[in-house]
Amino acid sequence: MIKGVGHIGIFVKSIEESVKALSKFVDFPELTIKESEKMGVKAGVVNLGGFELELIQGLEDDGPLAQFVGEKGDMIHHFCLLTDDIDADLVKLKERGVEMMDSTPKVGVRGKRIAMSNPAALNGITIELSEP
Amino acid sequence: MIKGVGHIGIFVKSIEESVKALSKFVDFPELTIKESEKMGVKAGVVNLGGFELELIQGLEDDGPLAQFVGEKGDMIHHFCLLTDDIDADLVKLKERGVEMMDSTPKVGVRGKRIAMSNPAALNGITIELSEP
C-alpha cells in the first residue's frame, strides 16, 4: 500500500555543482553518494527536513544521461511513492491497467526494491515505486 | 529560514486526467482546486501522506502553458522550499548571488507569498520559495 511521497529524482550534470548551488538556498545537510555500475549512474541523496532529493548523475561523461542533461539541462525526472509491499502494489497496478517500465521489482541505485512507471501512464511523468 | 520541501509543482494538460491516472496508484485523497486569472492557471492540490502535489493547468486551451504541455507532455516543473521568513531569505539569496525570477515575494495561485528562482541558478531546475 502506498504510504506517501519519499523523494524526487533529479537528473543533473554534476552532483557537485548541484550541491554547491543548492547550498546557497539551504544549510546543506549531509550528502550520501550511492553508485551503480550496472545502472551507469551515481546518486547523491540528501534529506531536507524529512524529504529526500536524489541527484542522479551519469557515470560516463559521454553516456546517455550525461548527453541528455548536456542538451536539455537538469530536470526533475520522477517522484517516488513509498509502498510497504511493492509486489502487491505491482499486481494491483497491473489489474488496473497501469503501464510500468518494470513489471517486477528491481534493485535501485540506493539498494532498495523499486519499479518505475511508464511515463505514458501519466502523460509524461515518471513515478518510482519504492520500498522504504 | 528554509524548513524543508513543501510540494512539487507539475505542469499538466488536464488536472482531471492526472487525478484519474494517479488514482490508479493511490487511494486518492481530497483535491482542492485554486484558480488565478492573473496567473492564467488553476492548481489542483492534493496531500499524499503529508506531502503535496500541485497539478498546474493553464486556464486557456491555447495559452502558453497548454501549448507547452501539448508539445512536451506533462512535466515536474519545480519543487518548493518552505520558509518561515521569505523576505529575509530573499535578502540572503541576493547576497549569495542567486538569480531569482522574483526578487520580491508575489502571491501565488494558492494565496501564499512565494518567489520563484531563475532556472539558470540550478542548471534548469526551478525552486519555489513559499511561506507555509
Image (tube, coloured by chain):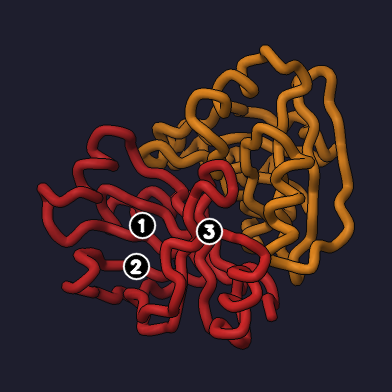
Chain colours: A orange, B red
Tell me if A114 is positioned left or right of B24 in this view: right
Subunit ID for the residue under disc 2: B
Question: Which residue position holds label 1?
Answer: B19
What residue is at 62 percent from the left and 61 percent from the top?
Answer: B97
- 3 or 2: mark nearer the eye: 3
Front in this rendered view, residue B102 or B73: B102
Mark 2 element type: strand
Subunit ID for the residue under disc 3: B
Mark 3 element type: loop
Q: Can residue B51 be seen in this view?
A: no
Q: Are marks 1 and 3 on the same chain?
A: yes
- 2 or 1: mark nearer the eye: 2
The mark found on residue B44 in the picture is 2
Mark 1 element type: helix
What residue is at 64 percent from the left and 44 percent from the top?
Answer: A9
- Which amino acid is tagged 2? Gly
Residue contact at pointers 2 and 1, CB within 8 angstroms: yes
Q: Earlier in the sequence, mark 2 or mark 1?
A: 1
Question: Which residue position holds label 3?
Answer: B99
What residue is at 63 percent from the left and 23 percent from the top?
Answer: A65
Q: Are marks 2 and 1 on the same chain?
A: yes
